[in-house]
Image: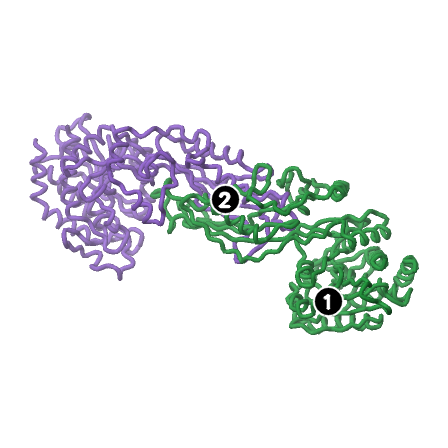
Chain colours: A green, B purple
Amino acid sequence: MSVEKVVGAAEGAFEASLGRLMQLLRIPSISTDPAYAEDCAKAAAWLVKELSALGFEASSRATPGRPMVVAHYTPKGADAKTPHALFYGHYDVQPVDPIEKWHTKPFEPVLKDGKLYGRGTADDKGQLMTFVEAARAWIAATGSLPIKATFLIEGEEESGSPSLIPFLQANKAELSCDVAFVCDTNMWDEKTPAITTRLRGLVHEEVEVTGPAIDLHSGMYGGPATNPIRALSGLVAALHDKNSKVTIPGFYDGVAALPKPTKKQWASLKFSEKKFLSAVGLKSSAGEKGFSVLEQIWARPTAEVNGMWGGYTGAGTKTVIPSKAFAKFTFRLVGKQNPQKILKAFQAFAKKHMMKDAKIKFSGHGGGSPASEISEGNAYIQKSAAALKAEWGRETVLMGSGGSIPIVRSFKDILGMDSVLVGFGLNDDAIHSPNEKYNLSSFQRGIKSWVRIIGALAQ
Amino acid sequence: MSVEKVVGAAEGAFEASLGRLMQLLRIPSISTDPAYAEDCAKAAAWLVKELSALGFEASSRATPGRPMVVAHYTPKGADAKTPHALFYGHYDVQPVDPIEKWHTKPFEPVLKDGKLYGRGTADDKGQLMTFVEAARAWIAATGSLPIKATFLIEGEEESGSPSLIPFLQANKAELSCDVAFVCDTNMWDEKTPAITTRLRGLVHEEVEVTGPAIDLHSGMYGGPATNPIRALSGLVAALHDKNSKVTIPGFYDGVAALPKPTKKQWASLKFSEKKFLSAVGLKSSAGEKGFSVLEQIWARPTAEVNGMWGGYTGAGTKTVIPSKAFAKFTFRLVGKQNPQKILKAFQAFAKKHMMKDAKIKFSGHGGGSPASEISEGNAYIQKSAAALKAEWGRETVLMGSGGSIPIVRSFKDILGMDSVLVGFGLNDDAIHSPNEKYNLSSFQRGIKSWVRIIGALAQ
């Protein structure tokens, strides 16, 4: 079976695909507002009906919140060796406020100049329908999908996914596949496909530093009294060396050098560091010397102080030596950095860097998550990247993200699956904002991209 | 004329002196509460009457607030060479709240176990009456004071002395004397007299550090973005070296070494650093290495951060890289340190220590005051110290104070006079608190001390 035949079938169905997406977009499935609970159930039912019609064993599953759509497809003759992939998306959308800034009605999608406007076009209905329509094209052209597929489409992503982890835990056997595809991310640019292979982990900690037992008058005690702000500043200042390398012993354990091909690819992206920084009023990078800005965000760990306070902060002057000072820290992790070890190493470092007479107390809430990284050499990544390149005619960018996407962590921790993050969104899609849009090319070539990826998985 | 004869006259009048003090104490001259404005006028009038009766040219002078008592005494035959001293005290008192904690009525003074209880006994009616009664003893025993004297007794000291500076400016010629004696301070201990010769100056400054133009998400920008809290912490941490010496270039210009006799005297005071520090929950001094705690407070300058804030300070965690961070600084000055130079040196230092892409703005209100120091070798200090020693039988402690007393600055700046700070208060007098008291010995030997100081001035 030639994939090109399936691609042709997808192209032939573009108009009908768009019509179906429009139907889904017209359902105001806002998950954060209970007033729209029924609409969420409606969207879930719509998906179940569509997937059932395609031959999926589909159901809308109740949760304490919005229903979860689960659909399975098993080709005839499939066995244990047949690849099994999970595809994730979410049918819920953000609220529409401020409504007065919309140029069209958010739940009456409008196609204009090659862009589809409406709430959820990009986040995430347009995206999830790319893999739904790709499945349809395979079934239409060949009578079946060439792989086992499980679709998991949740309805609480915009509300922090409160039901997701319990649901994954309760349905572990049913949902565990060889690999997960998450379709909720962006392309590198309008013409260049991308797979996000690196998400940084996160550890947070809060500290309270006590100097004197009570606030003191600096006339009375200024000189001998230990100032907790000075003590805490000393700690913050000691966290980085001159080259902005984090100085905590063992901090870089598990941080691997970037593979040469990846480094080379990132360097070739013509990413404008200047533009990126000047957009937020900065001139130069304050990050780790010897690394590009993209590397600093995508492939290097950080130690940040997110808040700090102590002493008199009102108007005017007060000659106080405060009793206490506080700070909140976060650490972004990469590679195999262990959150627990990082936390302990920081605590030991902080104690060591305290002034002699200052006491430090830690009040973080523990936890933290390691980085979610999938090797750029992973077979699923390689196959998907090649399929995307075949569709878009450009090398697929294997990029990183400085933040984390919780679902990826949950798939790994609970279901033992790596995630391949493929999406066709663009930076200017205005998700979560008025006038959200999704490029028609993202939708159409997105469908064809999945056709090719599914084909590649079957090889 | 033997001073001992005058001392004898003072002793003979002790009972009457106490009675007069009781009269003054019964007037509730609270300056902070407008309801007691008339009582303040009454206290001023009482003083004018007493001083007039002694032969002073005394008057109660209107101000926008409470009246100022000014009284002049010029001995017969006095000429330009006759010493002329100003004596300062204040007749206004603190409010009495919380009234329920008083064991006696605040304005019905009670003598019990050698202590006189009541509002204003120590601060400052009991103290100011020591020099009034000393003058009375001189006039009773010899028919005259042996020096020219000006008494300046204000009624707004507890309200921040808003009328004082304009009053001094408006009456500069009338009030300028050879030297001022301020009677509003403490003895070293119950048995040891003291003169406060050193008051530290003060400079304050506030800074605003800007990193990015807006708050950033640390997932998106963590790494390259300049964090203003880190930048500000770097500055705070850089202000002191390992030995807690301030590192601002030129900071110690004008700071002289402590004279050996003073250093020796302070060392002999058996001041318990441990007690002083443990009273506020500290174990060891964080001050400049190589100096005792007394030296650190009385004779060494400081750089303190009094408040600092930036970023997220609420509950929980927020992965923000803030746009701005702020801090308030004060510098305590000694010797000939120049406030303007210190401010400029700090600003230059702060700019130099900023991270490359951080902007710093200074928003202090300028000004600042130099230290008020009078050389321990100054003739008035020496004469007064000797007179106090003669009365108390112990070496007079020439001590410092870590804070400042505004009146001393005003006398110096406006009237060109040094101040000799002699007082008979004790640390346990509970001034500004319920059950304020003044030891009878402070009152009686205070009177005799002034008799001797006045005698010494006439020599």
Residues tagged by mark 1 and mark 2 found on one chain of the structure: yes
Chain hosting mark 2: A
Amino acid type, label 2: Leu
Q: Nearer the viewer, residue B40 or B319?
A: B319
x and y percentages locating residue A15 in the rendered image: 88, 63
Q: Nearer the viewer, residue B175 or A240?
A: A240
Position above or below: B373 against B444: above
Amino acid type, label 1: Leu
Closer to us: mark 1 or mark 2? 1
x and y percentages locating residue A417 in the rendered image: 72, 60
**Relative side of A441 to A306, left or right:** right
Look at the image and tell me in which quarter the C terminus of chain A lies: bottom right
**Relative side of B56 to A395, left or right:** left
Q: Secondary structure at mark 1?
A: helix
Decide: few, some or many residues near mark 2? Use Cα within 10 Å; few <14, some 14-19, many ≥20.
many
Tell me if I can see residue A62 in this picture: yes
Residue at (70%, 61%) from the top-left corner?
Answer: A416
x and y percentages locating residue A397 in the rendered image: 77, 48
Q: Secondary structure at mark 2?
A: helix
Position above or below: B110 against B361: below
Q: CA distance from mark 1 to mark 2?
A: 46 Å
Numbered badge on residue A404: none
Quarter location, residue B250: top left
Residue found farthest to the top:
B81
Residue at (43%, 45%) from the top-left corner?
Answer: B306
Position above or below: B216 against B250: below
Decide: few, some or many residues near mark 1? Use Cα within 10 Å; few <14, some 14-19, many ≥20.
many
Label located before the other in sequence (1 or 2)? 1
Numbered badge on residue A235: 2
Which residue position is annotated with label 1?
A: A175
